[in-house]
Every structure is written in C-alpha cells, then in structure tokens.
Image (spheres, grey):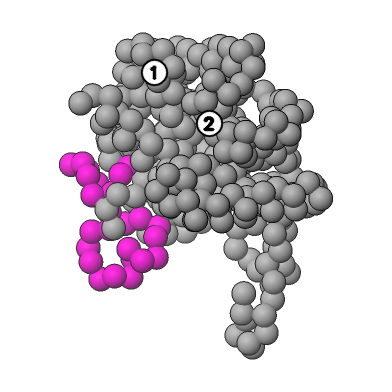
Amino acid sequence: MTCGSGMVRPIRKGTAATLNFAAVMAQASRLSKDFDPEWSANALAASEKAFIWAIRNDSVPFVNPDDVRTGEYGDDVFTDDFYWAAAELYLTTKNPAYLGYVYQNQQPYVHQLTNSWKFFIRNNGFHSLLENTDMLDEAYANALKENHLILADAILEQIYVNPYKIALNVFEWGSNSDILNQAVILCMAHRLTGDEKYLVGAEQITDYIFGKNATGYCFLTGFGSKQAMNIHHRPSGADRIVEPIPGFIVGGPNGDKQDQNSVDYVSVFPAQSYMDVEESYASNEVCINWNAPAVFVLGYLNNARK
C-alpha cells in the first residue's frame, strides 16, 4: 500500500487469510485441472506454499496498521481455517497427511450466525468433503452426512413456525448472508438425499430475499416491484445512473443499526431495520460474502427445477 507521501507501508498477512487462500487455490486447482493444467499446477503450488507458511505461523491474527482505519475483520481462531484448507488440499492431492489435519482439527457441525466471512469457513470444508465422500473413511463420511441432515432439519423446523418462512430470528449485520447460507445448507441436504422438503425450504428463503419479508424490499438489485435503489456501494453511487449495478445482494435488516447516527430508521423492530439509503452501511451495503451464497443457491435451484 502506498501512502500520499509515496512511502510504502505494508499490510501484514495473517494465519486465517493465508489458510483461506490455500483452500481457495486448492479447490481452484482441482476444478481447472482438465482444461488448464498449467494454471492448475501453479494454483496448487501456491496453495501448498501458503499452507506451509500457516503451519509455521499458526497464531498470527490480522491487525490493522496504526494509520489504517477501515474494517479490521479480526479473527484469532484458526482451527476452522486449518480444517477447510486441509480438506481442500486433501481432495486435490489425495495426500493422506492433509486428511490427518482434517481429523486433528475436528469442528462442531453447526451454522454459526453473523460474520459469515469468519464463521462459515468450517461449513465450506464440510460441503467439499460431502461432495467427495468416496475419498473418506466410511464412518467419517456417514457422520458428516448425518450431522448435515440434523442441521438442515433444524433449519426446516424453524422455517415451519416462522410467518415469513425463514429460519432466522436474529437480525444482525449481513442478516441476508446468514439466511442465504442456511439456504446453501438446505441445497446440500437436497443434493445428499433428493428429498423435496429441502428444496422447498431453500425456495422459501429465496422468496424472502425477493420481497416476502417485513420490509417488502427485494434485496437483490435490479429485481422486484420494490427495489433496493440506493445501495452503499461507491461505484453505483458515482456512475450518474439512477439504478444501482444489478445483481447485488444488500446486507438486509440489522437490529443493531450501527449507522443510526446518520440514518433515520423508520422502525424499531429488528426485522424491519433496513433503510434504502446510500448512507446505511449497516443495512444496505453490498458484500461478496452475501453475494456468494446467493449465486450458489439461485444456480442450484435453477438447475434443480429445470
């Protein structure tokens, strides 16, 4: 990073981000191997190098430099990151040493709400392993599947009793990320079993995203009769075009309203704590970690309902 004075000030890497890089590169290597073997090999080399660095530097949380004021996104629990990275590296390389790391870093089979960029990491690992159970010990594979279906059934139970047919009763920053990640879990349950109930549950969650919610807004830009128009996204706000860039999921209702000093919320209820104004970074921001599950869920539903 270069400051106004021209002096370069480094932004340090940490253990969590390094392991997440390793996981993504390992998966990318696996998926690209057949059509771009050279790129695939480079990606795998980068992944393994990152994993080695993380092993040697296994407790380095990211901390902003003194002169950086943007979001720090701190994380000092790395077992879930090791789990995901080791899982992806094992599936790509078939090296049993990586499987050993998976077994040594057992994770609770839960969906931890809020901060999905940090707390959904273990679930990414679960899902990749569930896609490749033929590479696992039978007992471990069966346990993963059983635990996933227990989690998915718990989500369905909440959907059944919620008037908006969602499995969420806590609305914090990025609540749409939480609910879309629940839809991912249901899609995975449908993939494992073929049971229609999981597909219907995922569809009910997307109904919420598209407007069947306490605000009436469609939370995907460019769609709906009551659209999010004034998103907290600088390119959309600066392009002199009235409509925002289409295809973005906004954060959604946030009962904590961290921006309430500059945003006049019209409701005191958490499920309605959303404002379609550019200033509302707490409810109307766009972010990759809530767009990603939307892409997965909509793609899965489109394919399943053909």
Decide if residue 231 is in sight here: yes
Which residue sits at x=48%, y=17%?
152
Magenta stretch holds residue 231 = yes
Q: Locate the N terminus and report the quarter of the image it occupies.
A: bottom right
Closer to the camera, 73 or 168? 73
Helix or strand or loop: what does disc 2 sit on? helix
Q: Mark 1 is on which residue type?
A: His
Report whether 172 appears left or right of 160.
Answer: right
Q: Is residue 7 above or below residue 42?
A: below
Which residue sits at x=40%, y=20%?
191
Q: Mark 2 is on which residue type?
A: Ser
Residue tagged by mark 2?
128
Q: Read off the magenta span.
A: 219-244
Q: Residue furthest toward the left?
A: 225
Closer to the camera, 112 or 268? 112
Name the disc covering residue 168, or none: none
- Using a 10 Å C-alpha cutoff, classify the residue at mark 1 as few (fewer than 14 neighbours), some (14 to 19) or many (20 or more): many
Foreground mark, 1 or 2, reads 2
Q: Residue 130 placed where, x, y %?
A: 52, 23
Which is more N-terminal, label 2 or label 1?
Answer: 2
Closer to the camera, 231 or 19? 19
Q: Is residue 36 above or below residue 99?
A: below
Residue tagged by mark 1?
190
